[in-house]
Image (cartoon, rainbow, N blue to C red):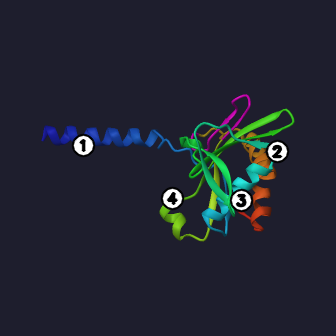
C-alpha cells in the first residue's frame, strides 16, 4: 500500500511539473497558407530569395535544388537552415536588419499528397537580438515588435511569393 501511495504521489508530482514546463516548441509567430503544393511554394520561396537584393542567407554546408527548368540554387544544410523544412534568411532595409527562421508546414508524407502548403515564422530577431519565438512567449508583451517583424517579412518576402505564384495567401496564427 505504501508503494502505491508513493507511486501516486510521484505521478501527481510529474504531472504538475508538466503543467508548468513548456513543450520546448518554437510555435508560430504567423503563418502564410497557399493553395499550391509544397514543391511549388518552395520554388517560389527560392526565386524570391534569389531575386530580392534585401534578402540574403549565410552559407554553411551547401547542396543544390532545381528551382526552375534546369536552374539551380544553393541551399544550406543545417538544422534551422536546411532549405527543406526550415529556412533562415536576413532581410536588410537601410540600417535595419532582421533574421527570420521560417518552416514549411508538414512533413515529406504530407507534402507528397497535399495540394496546399504553408510557411510560418518560427523565430524573428533584429540585429540587436530583440525578438524570439511565439512558443517561448517572446512577444507576450511586445505586440508592436511582433507587428514590425511581420510587416517587414510580408512586404519583402510574402507579397513577392504571392506574385511569383500568382496567388494570394491566407494568414494563419
Instruction: Using the image, determine if residue 127 lies above or below residue 145.
Output: above
On the question of residue 99 being in view, the answer is yes
Residue 68, by quadrant, is bottom right
Residue 139 shown left or right of residue 109 in the figure: right
Q: Secondary structure at mark 2?
A: loop
Q: Earlier in the sequence, mark 1 or mark 2?
A: 1
Residue that numbered label 2 is attached to: 53
**Main structural element of the magenta stretch: helix, strand or loop?**
loop
Q: Earlier in the sequence, mark 4 or mark 3?
A: 3
Residue that protrudes farthest toward the right in the picture? 94
User: The C terminus is located in which quarter?
Assistant: bottom right
Residue that numbered label 1 is attached to: 8
Residue 170, by quadrant, is bottom right
Q: Earlier in the sequence, mark 1 or mark 4?
A: 1
Residue that protrudes farthest toward the left in the picture? 1
Residue at 75% across, 55% down: 158
Q: Secondary structure at mark 3?
A: helix
Q: Residues under labels 1 and 3: Cα distance?
A: 54 Å
Q: Which mark is residue 107?
A: 4
Q: Nearer the viewer, residue 89 or 77?
A: 77
In reply to whether residue 56 is colored magenta, the answer given is no
Tell me which segment is drawn in magenta: 124-136
Whether residues under marks 2 and 4 lie with C-beta atoms below 8 angstroms apart, the answer is no
Amino acid at each position: 500500500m505504501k508503494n502505491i501511495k508513493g507511486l501516486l504521489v510521484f505521478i501527481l508530482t510529474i504531472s504538475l511539473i508538466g503543467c508548468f514546463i513548456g513543450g520546448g516548441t518554437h510555435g508560430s509567430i504567423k503563418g502564410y497558407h497557399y493553395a499550391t503544393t509544397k514543391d511549388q511554394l518552395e520554388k517560389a520561396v527560392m526565386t524570391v530569395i534569389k531575386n530580392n537584393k534585401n534578402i540574403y542567407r549565410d552559407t554553411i554546408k551547401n547542396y543544390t535544388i532545381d528551382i526552375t527548368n534546369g536552374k539551380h540554387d544553393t541551399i544550406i544544410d543545417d538544422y534551422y537552415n536546411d532549405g527543406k523544412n526550415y529556412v533562415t534568411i536576413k532581410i536588410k532595409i537601410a540600417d535595419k536588419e532582421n533574421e527570420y527562421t521560417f518552416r514549411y508546414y508538414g512533413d515529406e508524407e504530407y507534402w507528397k499528397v497535399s495540394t496546399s502548403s504553408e510557411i510560418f515564422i518560427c523565430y524573428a530577431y533584429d540585429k540587436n537580438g530583440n525578438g524570439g519565438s511565439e512558443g517561448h512567449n517572446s512577444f507576450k508583451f511586445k505586440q508592436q515588435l511582433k507587428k514590425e517583424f511581420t510587416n517587414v517579412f510580408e512586404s519583402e518576402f510574402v507579397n513577392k511569393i504571392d506574385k511569383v505564384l500568382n496567388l494570394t495567401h491566407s494568414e494563419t496564427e
